[in-house]
Amino acid sequence: MNQAFKKYGTLLSLYLAQSIPMSFFSTVVPVIMRQEEYSLTSIGLIQLIKIPWILKFLWAPLIDHTSPQRKHYRRWILGAEIFYAMVIVFVSFFNLSTDFTTIIILVVIAFIASGTQDIATDAFAILTLKPKERSLGNSMQSGGSFLGTTIGSGVLLMAYYYIGWQALLLLLAFLVTMALMPVTFARLPLEKKDMTPKRRPKWDDGFSFFKQKGNIRHLLLLFLYNSGIIGLLALFKPFMVDQGYTTKEIGMISGIYGTAVGALFSLGGGWLIRKIKRPTALQIIFLAGFLTSLFFVWEMNGDVPLWAIYVASSMVWGTYGMASVFIYTVAMDKVRPGLEGTDFTIQIVITHMSSLFLTIGLSKFANSFGYQGMYILEAHMGIILLILSRTVFKKVVER
């Protein structure tokens, strides 16, 4: 079997394993909440279950410093993901209606394990991929995440309609376990040289990333990166609920169709980054986000026809797919040797953290001023990002 195929296939399966449960928990609960007439503000707050993914930079240095070679990261991956699956099985014995708080606590614990797996997987990917392979490798990362979302928020959301909570959670744990098979048995190319033992972790290993010279613009890019589309993405399913769509229809249109488009465009994003200059690629991505917000302003109000719902789903997920590959590739290029997991985690955590705060803020804004007001605000943010891509961010992404 081709060695490159082994690399990409292994990475695809790893990101698939972590994204299926996360997308399931973050999708099923908001849809059910909206059907129970919770406010948009409350739905935005449910995103706080992702807090472990924001705080994971705190234990990322420990994983780096206990992993002198790629095989050590592999052990972290397997251990964390098996624990992840076990917690999911445990969750299945609780009732979603009567044990909501307990389930949320267990999901947070599961996300701690998932975050640990993600740290190790990112470092594993950086050490496995050559610099020229990173754009396509990150397409596997983004594609795996979107395919996981397709399964978790689409297929499983529809399955929930038919088989119920407990059977679905057991199926979910089984899928997670099966996705670990490639990294368990694949024989990847040996590392070119043995790595010297790493020094003991220091308390400021993560924070020292911020002390690097010329990092201010890069950090600003990470923080603002998703601001032009995150509100459109986060409130798309609640909007469909308000339009009268059923759980099954939402699962099909957004969960399956939309995320499949995202996976396809993530592959296109990897190709785009390899073929054109990065500043130009960044401008194309921000332009796509701006045009998406304009479409939402023009078409997503009143009684929205089905064709517009599908176009909106294509645009928002397609843009997000391209954007994900780009930011992963830029982040990989900024890691320090020996702190691959820590540095990559910090950068992606910044994008997650900003997306979380923006989602909560934009949900509150939409609750006060309606979906249309939020769409208009996102369009203005898209214009700002386009301007910044031609000025402040241009040198940040140049190689």
Image (tube, rainbow, N blue to C red):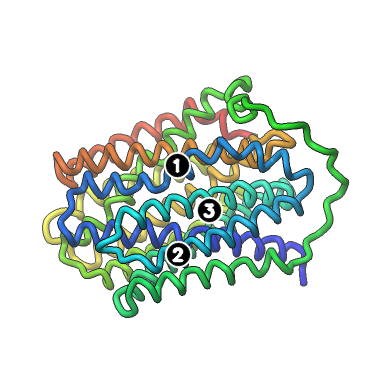
The residue at 54%/52% (across/down) is: 113
The residue singled out by tag 1 in the image is 352
Badge 2 or badge 1: first in the primary sequence: 2
- Camera-near label (2 vs 3) is 2
Q: Amino acid at mark 3?
A: Ser
> Residue 73: x, y in percent?
70, 51
- Name the residue that disc number 2 marks: 90
Task: Describe the element under mark 2 as helix, strand or loop.
Answer: helix
Work out whether residue 74 or residue 284 is closer to the camera in this orientation and state it.
Answer: 74
| Eye-nearest disc, 1 or 3 | 3
Q: Quadrant of residue 385?
A: top left
Residue at point 69% right, 51% down? 124
Name which residue type carries label 1. Answer: His
Of 11 and 317, which appears nearest the observer? 11
Residue marked by disc 3:
114
Quadrant for the C terminus in the image:
top right
Please give the count of numbered marks on the rendered protein.
Answer: 3
User: Mark 2: which amino acid?
Assistant: Phe
Secondary structure beneath dot 3 equals helix
Q: Position of residue 366 (x, y in %)?
A: 19, 43
As measured in the structure, the alpha-carbon distance from the residue carrying label 2 to the one carrying label 1 is: 27 Å
Distance from Cα at disc 1 to Cα at disc 3: 14 Å
- Residue at x-position 64% and y-position 28%: 205
